Amino acid sequence: MTQDVKEIFADRRGSGTSRGASGRSVAVPSAQAAAPAPPAPAALAAKVRTLAPSMTRSMQRVAEAVAGDPAGCAALTVTGLAGLTGTSEATVVRTARLLGYPGYRDLRLALAGLAAQQESGRAPAITTDIAVDDPIADVVAKLAHDEQQTLADTAAGLDTVQLGAAVAALAGARRTDVYGIGASGLVAQDLTQKLLRIGLIAHAPSDPHLAVTNAVQLRAGDVAVAITHSGSTGDVIEPLRVAFERGATTIAVTGRPDGPVTQYADHVLTTSTARESELRPAAMSSRTSQLLVVDCLFVGIAQRTYESAAPALSASYEALAHRHRSGSR
């Protein structure tokens, strides 16, 4: 059997379905299925850092090898890389797909491109396609394009049935707790402030211990929202689990619909994972897509509670109006 045939069979063995942490069947796309364009070579290290926590140990060895020595790994066949990392051909192919490449050949091409870029002395990348010597006008244009694509990807992938169910639960909740850490914590604060402005009771504890003790007080009729791009943030999953066990309706806003957080979520709202930053892996794109979901939730809730939301919003504007008039003290 030739090496090319071996790689084709390895690709086929890697396709099918897998079981996510929530117990849901998760489709693994085949090489022939429609998929987003593979990430640029410069984004490989960011992909590895972002996705490594959700990989098996054997897949981590493959990912660390290709990120650490792109030139050396680009010269290896799928069998060679499997031997170097002490894994199997199927593991190598699955790792390539998880990193965003249709198959191992596509990953090898990206590795070769990354190696050539490193050898040429070209300016290193700050983000997927922004270099340290790019003019600021180019930075603005590229970031604006990425933000627009992130919003479009999130809107296209958002399950409106799940969104409607989440809106209904939040609109009728006795109280709402929102959990998030880091950049996701800022999004949690944004959702909480929006709910408060229309007269709903909401909390976004920034301390992980306080989040858990708050969750203990929840019950049926309450709602808990977990915001985590990776889907595996322990400080977000723990209070959501407690809220779930207490009978509250639970919602997960995540870029990983197969992540651990979803096993405690009644409703899952998926955000885009297509655009990541080399400087801050996932943080920029995840925040943009999460804020879109928050705005969708808020507008949906305001529609359902308009009779009470409109006066509450008007009163909050009036209460702050004097702070925005020129010359006010």
Image (tube, rainbow, N blue to C red):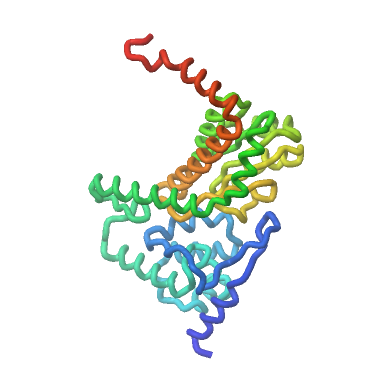
| Residue 42 appears left or right of 22 | left
Q: Residue furthest top?
A: 329
Q: Is 188 or 63 nearer to us in this picture?
A: 188
Q: Residue furthest front?
A: 307
| Residue 72 appears left or right of 157 | left
Please give the count of numbered marks on the rendered protein: 0
Residue 197: x and y in percent read 54, 25
Quadrant position of the N terminus in the picture: bottom right
Is residue 205 in view from this perspective?
no
Q: Is 298 or 202 nearer to us in this picture?
A: 298
Q: Residue furthest bottom?
A: 1
Classify 161 as above or below 291.
Answer: below
| Residue 299 appears left or right of 110 | right
Residue 311: x and y in percent read 54, 21
Name the residue rendered at 50%, 63% in the picture: 63
Residue 6: x and y in percent read 53, 83
Residue 155: x and y in percent read 49, 50
Which quadrant would residue 12 be assigned to in this image? bottom right
Name the residue rendered at 47%, 16% in the picture: 318
Quadrant position of the C terminus in the picture: top left
Is residue 57 in view from this perspective?
yes
Q: Is 126 or 67 nearer to us in this picture?
A: 126
Name the residue rendered at 52%, 23% in the picture: 313
